[in-house]
Every structure is written in C-alpha cells, then in structure tokens.
Amino acid sequence: MMRIRVTTTDRTVDSSISRRDFCRLAACAATGTLASGFAWGQSHLVQGRVTKVALLLSGVITDGGWSALAYGGLRGLARTPGFQTAYMENITLARMQQVARGYSDDGFDLIIGHGFEFASALIDVAPDYPAQKYFVTNYQPHEAVPANILFIDLEYYAAAFGAGALAALISEKKFAVGFVGGEDDPNQQRIRRCFIAGAQYAVPGIRGLGIITGDYDNAARGREAAATLVGHGADVIWHGADVTGLGAIEGAAAAGIKVMGCYSDQTSLAPRNMATSFELNIRGAVETVAKWVAAGSFTGGREWKPTVDEMWLPRAGANGDHNPKLVSAEAWSGFQRVWRELAARKIAVPS
Amino acid sequence: MNTAFWVTWLAASVRLAGPVLAAAEGELVCERAGVLNVGIEGTILLGALASFLTAQATGSLTLSLVAAIAAGVLVNLFLAWMYVTVRASQVVAGLVFNVLAVGAASAIYRLALGGETAQRTIPTFPPVAIPWLSSLPIIGPVFFAQTAPLYLTLLAAAGAHVFLFRTRTGLALRAAGENPRAADAAGISVERMRYLGVLVSGAMAGMAGAYMVLAQVGFFREGMVAGQGFIALGIVIFGRWSPWKAVGAALVFGACDALQFSLQLSSGSVPPQLLLALPYLVTILAISGIFGRAGKPAALMQPYSRD
C-alpha cells in the first residue's frame, strides 16, 4: 500500500507542472474527479520561496515509534511558513530508487530517507540530481559519498550505554537488567553490548541480559522476550525494537517491573511502570536539516554528529524527564553524571 | 539448565503457540472440506482490528472477542463465495485478499485514530490460575496459569475433533474434502459443507487476531500478524490434518520460537542466527514430508461443480 499526502503552508506562483502533477491530474480527469485535481494543483499557487521536503518511509506513520517520529518532524515543517511537505509510506527496497527519483524530478529540495535501508538507493540517486539535497537518518556507510547527501550518527550506542546505566541504578534487587532487541543485525548486537556495559559501569557486578528477537514488528515476541528476561531475574527492561519493543513494555508491565521506553515517549503504554523513555530526536534532526536547506547552509558529503544529549531526550509524560516514583533522586543524579560524560565523549562505549 | 530456564521457555512456548493454534484449528476444518484458505493471514489482522476497536469502544473483552469472531466470519463469507461459488484459484484469491485486508485494516485504523499518531492501549485478559493444578512444579505455571483465550483455543481443538470425527455433519464435511462427487451422490451438499469449512476457518482466524490483541499485547498495529497466518498453514500440514496433532505441532513451533530467547541467555556457543531461524527451519522440515506421508484431503484445492 502506498499513500501520499501533500500539505503547504505558503503560496507562490509555479508556472511549471511536474510529471507527478500531470499524472495526478490525468488520473483525476479519467475518474471524473477533476475538481479534486484542481484543488490539489492550487497548493502550488504560493508567494515567495518554498522549500519542498519529501519523507520516504519503509514503515507507516501510525507505528507509534520509528516512522511516527520522522513524520512528527515533517508535520512540524508543514506548520512552518515556507515549507511544503510530502511523504510516502511502505516503500519496499525495490522501489526506493524509483520513488526518490520521482520526488527529485518533481523538484523537491530535500528528500529524506528514514532508515539505513535508504542509504544505498539515495547514494545512487544523489549524483544525478546535484541541485537536490538528500538526508539519510542513519550512519554514513562508507567514506566517499556524494556531496549533496548527509548522514547522521544517531548516537545509538552512547544512548544504549546510558540506558543500561540508568536501568542498573533503578534496579531494586541489583541482580539483573534486560534488553529486548529487534532484528539480528550488527547494530542491535552492539546496542545490546553497550546496554550491558552501561549497566555494569554504573553498578559493578550486576548481570546485563539481552535478547535479540529477530523482528522489529512482532509485539508478541517482544512480550515473551520480556517475560523470559523477568524469569531470569531482570527487574528493569529497556528495548530498542520498535513494535516488538511495545510488546516488551507490555510484558514488563504485566510482570509488574520497571521498564524504559525507546524512540518516543512511551509513558502512556505503561504509566505505572515506565521510569523514563529515551526519545530519539529525529523530529529535531528533520527540522534542522530542512532549515539548513532553506537557508542554503546545507553541507553534504559527510556524517552529522550530534551529541547523545542532543539526539536522545529522556521523557516521562507529565512527569517531565523521569518518573520520580520509580527513579530515586540519587539514581537520577547518578544517571545524569554518566549522561554528561557520554555527551562529552569521555566514556568509550564498546565496539 | 535451572528451573527458571524450563519454566520461562515452556511458558513462552505455550503462549506463542496460542494464536497460531487457534488459526490452525479453523484452517484444518476448512482444508478437511477441500478448501485451502490462504486468506487467514488477512482475516487474523481484521479480527485483531475488530477486537481492538470494540475494546476501545465498549471496554468489554468478551464482546471484543465476539466481535473479532464475527468479523472473521463476515469477511470469510466473501472468501467462501470466491473459493466455492466462483471457483476462483484458492491460492490467488487468498493472497490477494491478504493484501486487501492490510489496506482495509490500515485505512480503518487511521480513520479510528482521527489523524493522531499517539499510542493507544487496551486492557488484556489476565492469566487465570486453575486451582491446585497451577501450583504444580514447572507444569503448573506453564499450562495452568494461562489466559482465557488459550483455554478457549484448547476447547476449540477438542471441539474440532468431536465435530470432525463424532458427528454426522463432520463426516459430511470430510466427505466433501475427500471425494466431493461421491459425497454429492450420497445427497451431501458439497457447496454447503465447503462454505461451512471456510466460515469456521474465518471464525477461528478472527479469534486468533483477538488473541494477539486481547491476551498478548493490548494494542493494534498494521504489521502485527507478521506471517503467523502462514505459520498456521504449515502447522495444519505438520499436524497431519488432525486437531490433536495440530496442538502438538503448534507447541513444537512455539517451543522452537521461544527456545531462542532462553538459549540467548544461557548459552554463548550457539550462533544466534541459527536460533532465530530454528522455528522456520522446523516448519519447513515438518511440511516437507521427510517425517512421513502428509495424508492431505484428497480433493484439497479442487473446485467442485455438479456439471
């Protein structure tokens, strides 16, 4: 299933018609809905310079996690004067290049591929469209990349280390803390190692447990992974597994232990058990890069390296950054010390 | 390996087996009637959505379970018409239906969300500890402290066995799947039996969807079925089209799936990639026929016409 939304917050005159607009108008005319085609076309009647931003997603905006975060950034842009936004969901690997070229042909100034899976496709497309800018929300895969494409170091490993430290600090029994991972890839394996290292850095001797479920989208597996961790003595659980991780939160809540969210503020999923959530600031990254493009200050061919405290924001709903009923002042203070050291890159996280 | 290993592994095995077993028991009845219902993957998803939306609207878990079963029956009326009346290719119709179901579920869920992307959850069925039995060592927490949908699924397996092998209608349904022409000559309505099989399959697949939402995770996501309908198809073959053997097959699949979790915590020598592939490897081996003759219904996937 493919869906496209286009929104605009400003108006200007655009005398040209893109291939995509033409196809849309033709389709509308063919189905007798020409009025709706004109209504869409009027969104191009704008005053002043408009920066057009397209977001490409392999998931859906209602996933309550990874894709929803980037979509949140796009929605923020849509509300900002001078930006026009579009997005497409459920893009398969086979169609990534085709979709990226479609938006490039249509004159979108910035095309964002959300996730590592877009890296190869956008690296291939970028040299053919030097006027466009591309942003992939993942690591730079190799040294030489086109000058108009930007990558980002999301500081996953530092965040995992910090999460491990906080989990150990808020553990009641100080026996074991657990991590539930998604697909079995080197990133998730390293995140697991960093979580365990963080836990043992904060509380020497505590057991760090980790299960890689092999799936980002299977909540039932996440729940069972959490139950298995609890059965092995873990009394705090963190995840890095999107929808599978939501199941892990349910599993932890069912077992009555503390849990920490990931990617977004997940307090609402288990308000009584959620100590904090490590919200990935993709929204801020999307908005920042789009504003660089609008201002003409975008510089590509590199990897952007924000610090962990810029990229990951502890959130706990109405409680602010942590739930004081689950996190003591002493534990929070200890975590902040570790967090500051990670932000200053004074702690070497495992490779 | 300590007690924690055995209890966590076996309990997770039973819980993971639940939804696929529910879907497999319905599919088994359907295939016994001669129809391969590939559309159960989509039906599970629609059942999950129906149960989630009903739980949100009413707060009643029982009503949500009923709504999921009703949704499964309703959408499988269409599938039954395609398979039996239109005599469309059962594989193609089922696969296309699965794609349609994802689109429909996505559209309905978004309409229900009203544009927000916040996470909504619903309460889930609590575990029900059966007195005395649940306190038995290892076996107690594994088998006798589960949720109501699991007990219902096991009752459904018993019901499927009784229906297929102890009732006149069950005999007629099996006849429609083995030799529809002879069944027709004996006065059995093959069309009616096959409709019945598909609708039973729809009801159980809808229940499997409700199981995931109401007993496992407490929320709905478009990709949450994650191929479990196809695993159920494999379990029917693995279980040799027998309701009781299907219970064993589902437990083996659940055990393989859960084993990766426990072994990751207790063994550093087994490659994690092998553990992750284990449940699928076992399923492929099971349906390959290596472990004996499959013994499928003779007229499975054969459309029937009196002409």
Image (spheres, rainbow, N blue to C red):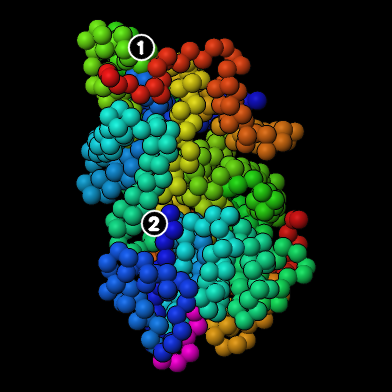
SS at circle 1: loop
**CA gap, disc 1 to disc 2?**
51 Å
Where is B303 relative to B125, above or below? above
Question: Are there few (<14), some (14-19), or many (20+) residues within 10 Å of tag 1?
Answer: some
Q: Chain of mark 1?
A: B
| x and y, in percent, of residue B184 in the image | 26, 12
In the rendered image, which quarter contains the N terminus of chain B? top right
Task: Say whether residue A51 is magenta.
Answer: yes
SS at circle 2: loop
Q: Which residues are magenta?
A: A47-53
| x and y, in percent, of residue B95 in the image | 43, 39
Which of the pair A283/A130 is nearer the observer? A130
**CB under 8 Å between discs 1 and 2:** no
| x and y, in percent, of residue B255 in the image | 55, 26
The residue pinned by badge 1 equals B179
> Which dot marks residue B119?
2
Amino acid marked by disc 2: Gln
Task: Say whether residue B255 is magenta.
Answer: no
Q: Is residue A177 left or right of residue A78?
A: right
Where is B229 relative to A64, above or below? above
Where is B257 relative to B184, above or below? below
Which of the pair A276/B249 is nearer the observer? B249
| Residue depicted at 61% across the width and 52% down the height | A168
| Residue depicted at 74% across the width and 68% down the height | A346
In the rendered image, which quarter contains the C terminus of chain B? top left
Q: Chain of mark 2?
A: B
Query: Which residue appears farthest toward the front when viewing the image?
Result: B307
Count all numbered tags in the image, as a single digit. Answer: 2
Question: Are there few (<14), some (14-19), or many (20+) residues within 10 Å of tag 2?
Answer: many
| Residue depicted at 48% across the width and 12% down the height | B295
| x and y, in percent, of residue A27 in the image | 36, 66
Q: Quadrant of residue B62?
A: top left
